[in-house]
Amino acid sequence: MGKLISLVSGKGGTGKTTVAANLAVALGKLGKKVVAVDADLTMANLSLVMGMDDASVTIHDVLMGDASIDEAIYSLPQFENVYVIPAAVDWEHVIKADPRGLPETLAPLKEKFDFVLIDCPAGLQVDAMSAMLSSEEVILVTNPEISCIADTMKVGIVLKKAGLAILGFVLNRYGRSDNDIPPDAAAEAMEVPLLAVIPEDRAIREGTLEGIPVVVYKPNSEGAKAFMELAEQVMRISGFKAKVMY
């Protein structure tokens, strides 16, 4: 039985989609069959980050009742064991697709994949909550800034109360500023396990612009190594309930 994991943040601009893409490809490199789902129905970017061209069928079409979920799954031959369910980018699809249908739409994917990674909108609006509640486990993504950590912590509290297992958090883009909150201080504030520290790495930005996650673009870079360590950590702990972990 596969794992349904949502990647969430308290505010936009944390690099959550880049984390989702690299984690998916890293898990694929470790032999796991993975599908990455773009559940950000208004600001879809996952397919671009993963180098995918325009898709004829998207998660929007599925939510509108015009296609099955299987029709929206695309293989990515350039990445071993990795598939993607893209979202549409045009406003017509956005206004017609109801995000509240996401949980029942994504649940069957557990039968076909080892990991279902759901790239969620930031915040706690209806579309974000619908995407996050499609999962069973959560990875929080934050930057090493006080406001970002505070907002992400609030999202984690809400999701934990909703019964989801919080696997932990990723401290992304660390080292960008001399004023960055240190990892140990961030972990103390978040009160959930620190899964990985992803450094500010030029190779990550370059790979994103090329549509190639850094774990493939420059696998020996510090950023790629950090993402591979994150994937190994997720493989170890995913599947356990929060009460077992902390």
Image (cartoon, rainbow, N blue to C red):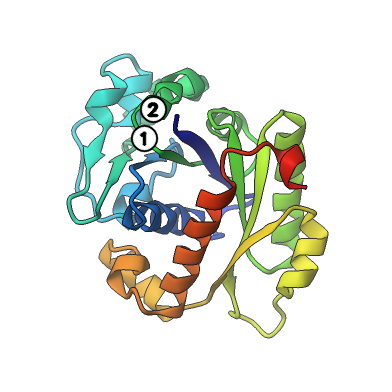
From the viewer's perspective, is 133 left or right of 89? Answer: right
- Residue 43 badge: none
Who is closer to the viewer here, 157 or 27? Answer: 27
From the viewer's perspective, is 38 left or right of 197? Answer: left
The residue at the point 40 percent across, 59 percent down is 22
Quarter in which the N terminus is drawn: top left
Who is closer to the viewer here, 22 or 220? Answer: 220
Residue 121 in sight in this render: no
Which amino acid does the dot numbered 2 rest on? Leu
Kindly state the secondary structure of the residue where label 1 is placed: loop
Who is closer to the viewer here, 112 or 175? Answer: 112
Outermost residue toward the bottom in this view: 178
Confirm or deny contact between disc 2 and disc 1 (CB under 8 A).
yes
The residue at the point 70 percent across, 36 percent down is 159
Q: Which residue bears the numbered disc 1?
A: 113
The residue at the point 33 percent across, 21 percent down is 62
Who is closer to the viewer here, 107 or 29? Answer: 29
Kindly state the secondary structure of the residue where label 2 is placed: helix
Q: Which residue bears the numbered disc 2?
A: 109
The residue at the point 40 percent across, 79 percent down is 221
Q: Which dot, 2 or 1, sits closer to the camera? A: 1
Which amino acid does the dot numbered 1 rest on? Phe
> In the rendering, at what x and y percent does residue 12 appear?
57, 53
